[in-house]
Every structure is written in structure tokens, then in C-alpha cells.
């Protein structure tokens, strides 16, 4: 199989456009590494590329799960393996791109959790506790046994909090420790990794502009439509950026202007966390899109990739 060409970076940095241009140059197909673009119906708020924006380049792992269904990192990793096998059989370049660092890590390093990490009885007890005491109580419990993972998860991200507690109580080790061991292990696949960055002020400006464009495109109606379909406020999908901020507005807790302000703020904070995650990976080749045009960045990525392809 050709090495995986990986393109990462914070939200709104310009990954989608660049990845499509790279795919056209290297006979590639794109594998999305976005934990929310897997859900059908979450389009505007996740900045999912439209058919027109994809320009005929095949995209994988988009729109594969109903928002009401559970979807884990292990599910994602297994599906990517199937895609990689298909691309290898057709001699296509796999381009893994997105901002969900855990998904990318699972593909490149492999998934380390054992089947014993899932305990239906334990899960049931944790769900009962969440029902009785609230999601925040469960998040506080996670903060005691695995503060690193607790900092990464929203207090209302019930499903992932429960999964992290399952891992701890079933294996005796926090989820963050499992991930550290996974990072330190040998790679599962050969890859060439690129990271995209911009000046912080410029990135934040792009984030604010993107949110304004999402509002013009009908983001609020998209959120209303999902809730009308019966999606609960505390579901994983409704905890995504661009969705959870509007739940409070629709409940009458604050006005629309405040919801938009919160979304811009939360997105900026998320971009900062993404950069912190990716900067731990010393194999990433960083490209500053304030200093390089998209076209120059594409040429640089293609040249370095082909050079590594033959090593």
C-alpha cells in the first residue's frame, strides 16, 4: 500500500481545500478524520464539504452514522482499515485529513483497547448514575481517576465519559494512559504527515468568518431540524461544536447573539486544543499558510510525499 498522506491542523485553517488539490495531484482519495462529519444531517455545523466543493474527489467516512447511533474510535478505525485495503487494491493514494487527533492516532498506531474494556453491567450502572445524579457528576468522577481525559471531554458528553470510566474500571488504567502507550508504540501504517498552521489572529479571524457564513447558510435551522427528529440534547451529535451552543438559545437561556458569540469562542478554544494535540507529534512537517499560497503548499506536500514514497 502507498504510505498514508496525512494532513492535519486546527479547524478553519484550510485543510479541506488543500487536501482536495493534493488528491488531484497524487491520484488520491480522501478519508475524513472528523468525529462529527461521520453523522448524517450534521452538515453546516461541521463544515462538511459539499459535493461541489469535493470536485469529484472521492471522500470516505462521511455520512455513515445516524446521529442517534453510537460510534466509537474502534468503529472508525475498523472502517478505515476496509477503505485502506480498497485503495491499496486500486493503487490509490490514501489521504487522511481532519482535526480529530484521536481518530488519526487510532489509524496510524492501531487500536489498543481489549474487548474486556466493554462491560455491559458496568455501563448500565454508570448510565443509571448519570440518570440519577446528572452528567456533571459522572464527569466529576472521571476527573478524579483520569483528569487528562476529563479536561478533553465536555461535561455533557455522556457517552464518551462513560466509555472512559469503563476503560478505567475494567483495565485499571486511565484512558489517557492507554493512549500514551499507543502513541509510544510502533506505527501500524507508513505515513507522511503534514500540519497546517496560520498566525493565531488570522486563524481566529477565519473562525469568526466561518461561523458567520454558517449562520447565513442556515445552521440554526439545521439544529432545530435535528431536535425535531428526536435527537436528545445530551447526545454525542448535539455536543458537537455548532450544535450545543444553540441548545441553550432554543431553551431560552440566552439570545441568538450570545449563542453565536459562544460558538466563536468555543471554536477558538477547540482550535487551540487541536494544536496542542498535534504539536506533540514530532513527525509532522508544518506548513504556514500565511507564508505559502495553497498552490505552493500543495507542490511542497506532493514533492515531499513522493520522495518518501520511494524510501
Image (spheres, rainbow, N blue to C red):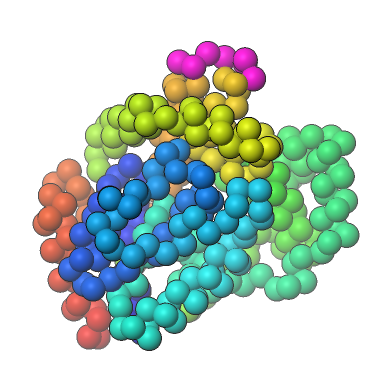
Work out whether residue 295 or residue 287 is closer to the camera in this orientation and state it. 295
Name the spot of residue 95 as percent of width and height, x first.
33, 67
**Quadrant showing the N terminus:** bottom left
Indicate whether 274 appears above or below 177: above
Q: Which residues are magenta?
A: 251-258
Q: How many marks?
A: 0
Q: Quadrant of residue 172?
A: bottom right
Q: Measuring 44% from the left and 21% from the top, which residue is drawn there?
A: 261
Q: Is residue 202 left or right of residue 274?
A: left
Give the quarter of the image for residue 170: bottom right
Say if residue 232 shows up in the picture.
yes
Write the residue at 85% across / 57% down: 122
User: Is 251 displayed left or right of 183 in the figure?
Assistant: right
Image location of residue 148, percent across then percent down: 61, 49
Residue 178's quadrant in the figure? bottom right
**Residue 254 among those drawn in magenta:** yes
Q: Position of residue 216 (x, y in %)?
A: 35, 26
Question: Residue at 30% across / 75% down in the picture?
Answer: 93
119 within the magenta span: no
Asked if residue 111 is positioned above or below residue 10 in the image, the reply reads: below
Amino acid at each position: 500500500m502507498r504510505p498514508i498522506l496525512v494532513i492535519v491542523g486546527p479547524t478553519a485553517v484550510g485543510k479541506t481545500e488543500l487536501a482536495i488539490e493534493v488528491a488531484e495531484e497524487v491520484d488520491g482519495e480522501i478519508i475524513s478524520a472528523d468525529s462529527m462529519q461521520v453523522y448524517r444531517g450534521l452538515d453546516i455545523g461541521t463544515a462538511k464539504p459539499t459535493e461541489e466543493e469535493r470536485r469529484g474527489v472521492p471522500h470516505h467516512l462521511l455520512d455513515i452514522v445516524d446521529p442517534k447511533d453510537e460510534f466509537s474510535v474502534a468503529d472508525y478505525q475498523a472502517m478505515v482499515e476496509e477503505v485502506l485495503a480498497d485503495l491499496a487494491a486500486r493503487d490509490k493514494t490514501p489521504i487522511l485529513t481532519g482535526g480529530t487527533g484521536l481518530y488519526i492516532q487510532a489509524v496510524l498506531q492501531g487500536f489498543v483497547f481489549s474487548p474486556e474494556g466493554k462491560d455491559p453491567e458496568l455501563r448500565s450502572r454508570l448510565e443509571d448514575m448519570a440518570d440519577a445524579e446528572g452528567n456533571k457528576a459522572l464527569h466529576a468522577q472521571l476527573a478524579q481517576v483520569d483528569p487528562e481525559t476529563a479536561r478533553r471531554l465536555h461535561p455533557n458528553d455522556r457517552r464518551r465519559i462513560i466509555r472512559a470510566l469503563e476503560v478505567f474500571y475494567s483495565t485499571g488504567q486511565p484512558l489517557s494512559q492507554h493512549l500514551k502507550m499507543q502513541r509510544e508504540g510502533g506505527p501500524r501504517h507508513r505515513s507522511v504527515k503534514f500540519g497546517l498552521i496560520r498566525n493565531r489572529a488570522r486563524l481566529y479571524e477565519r473562525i469568526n468568518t466561518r461561523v458567520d457564513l454558517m449562520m447565513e447558510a442556515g445552521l440554526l435551522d439545521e439544529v432545530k431540524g435535528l431536535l425535531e427528529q428526536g435527537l436528545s440534547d445530551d447526545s454525542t451529535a448535539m455536543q458537537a461544536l455548532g450544535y450545543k451552543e444553540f441548545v441553550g438559545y432554543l431553551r431560552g437561556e440566552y439570545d441568538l447573539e450570545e449563542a453565536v458569540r459562544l460558538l466563536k469562542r468555543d471554536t477558538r478554544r477547540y482550535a487551540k486544543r487541536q494544536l496542542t494535540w498535534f504539536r506533540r507529534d514530532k513527525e509532522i512537517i508544518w506548513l504556514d499558510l500565511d507564508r505559502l499560497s495553497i498552490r505552493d503548499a500543495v507542490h511542497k506536500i506532493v514533492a515531499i510525499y513522493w520522495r518518501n514514497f520511494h524510501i
